Image (tube, coloured by chain):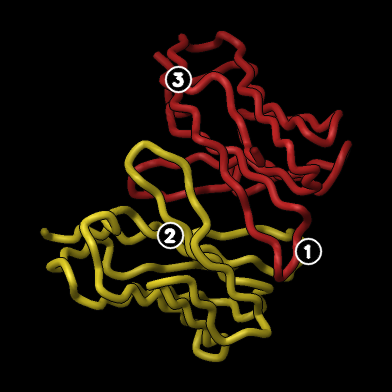
Amino acid sequence: KQEVTQIPAALSVPEGENLVLNCSFTDSAIYNLQWFRQDPGKGLTSLLLIQSSQREQTSGRLNASLDKSSGRSTLYIAASQPGDSATYLCAAGNWNRDDKIIFGKGTRLHILP
Amino acid sequence: EAQVTQNPRYLITVTGKKLTVTCSQNMNHEYMSWYRQDPGLGLRQIYYSMNVEVTDKGDVPEGYKVSRKEKRNFPLILESPSPNQTSLYFCASSLATGPQETQYFGPGTRLLVL
């Protein structure tokens, strides 16, 4: 059964720093890996989607990488801003008979002004 | 505007009183699903639907029902709500399942069962 883990659960960094959020998964038979942002009390917004055949995706200051062999994905945020403060979740889409999407519990990020 | 809508956004009810949370998408998506989000447990899938009249259980289906009579709608039904179903519920949709498909989420429904 697929398990998705995000460590740390919470992270505080000063504004302007570059940072990396980690996501690990136990079953490499995934068809994609998505990163989402969730603001308090709000829904999820998709940030980046990496297909299983891809190694990375970039959008503005965000870069997500995928290493299926090691079961890891990272989300790199460059030049962090207070507006980046949110919870970031990763989700693995699985090629199995259930076609389920499994979420990590998220990393709560706080950018200090 | 392409979106997933949920109603109601907030709901307080009592144990045993049947309720329905509606979900609608205007993107002609085939795949729709329901999640609940609880502190310390993260997002867990309740039910999903690959297309009209096709539904399947997720990880936590007990106490819930769904139906998919039309492509755009995927209501979540709690026949006899209990306090352990107090949670934040999200509906999501995607064009299909597959490597390139992004999921779009609704704004969430916060449910309190007394």
Instruction: Write the residue at 55% across / 66% down.
Output: A34
Badge 1 amino acid: Arg
Q: Which amino acid does label 2 sit on?
A: Leu
Rendered residue at 68%/46% (across/down): B93
Which chain does the numbered disc 2 sit on? A
The disc label shown at residue B19, or none: none
Residue B6 pos. (x, y %): 59, 28
Residue nearer the viewer, A42 or A24: A42
Give the number of the mark in front: 1 or 2: 2
- The residue at which mark 1 appears reads as A97
Chain at tag 1: A
**Is residue B76 depicted above or below B33 in this figure?**
above
Between marks 1 and 2, how big is the CA–CA gap?
24 Å
Determine the residue positioned at 35% across, 46% down: A39
Among numbered discs 1 and 2, the one appearing first in the sequence: 2
Circle 1 SS class: loop
Q: Name the residue under label 3.
A: B10
Q: Colour of chain B?
A: red
- Answer few, some or many: residues within 10 Å of disc 1's Cα (few below 14, many 20 plus, some between 14 and 19): few
* Badge 3 and badge 2 both on one subunit: no
Q: In this view, does B46 lie above or below A15?
A: above
Q: Residue A16: image x %, image y %?
A: 18, 72
Disc 3 from disc 2: Cα separation: 23 Å
Query: In the drawing, what numbered circle is on residue A89?
Result: 2
Name the tint of chain A in the rendering: yellow
User: In the shown orientation, is residue B31 left or right of residue B12?
Assistant: right
Dividing the picture into quadrants, the one containing residue B80 is top right
- Residue ranking furthest to the bottom: A69
Residue B13, x across and y down, in percent: 47, 11
Amino acid residing under circle 3: Tyr
Q: Are marks 1 and 2 in contact (CB under 8 Å)?
A: no
Q: Tell whether A108 sits left or right of A67.
A: left
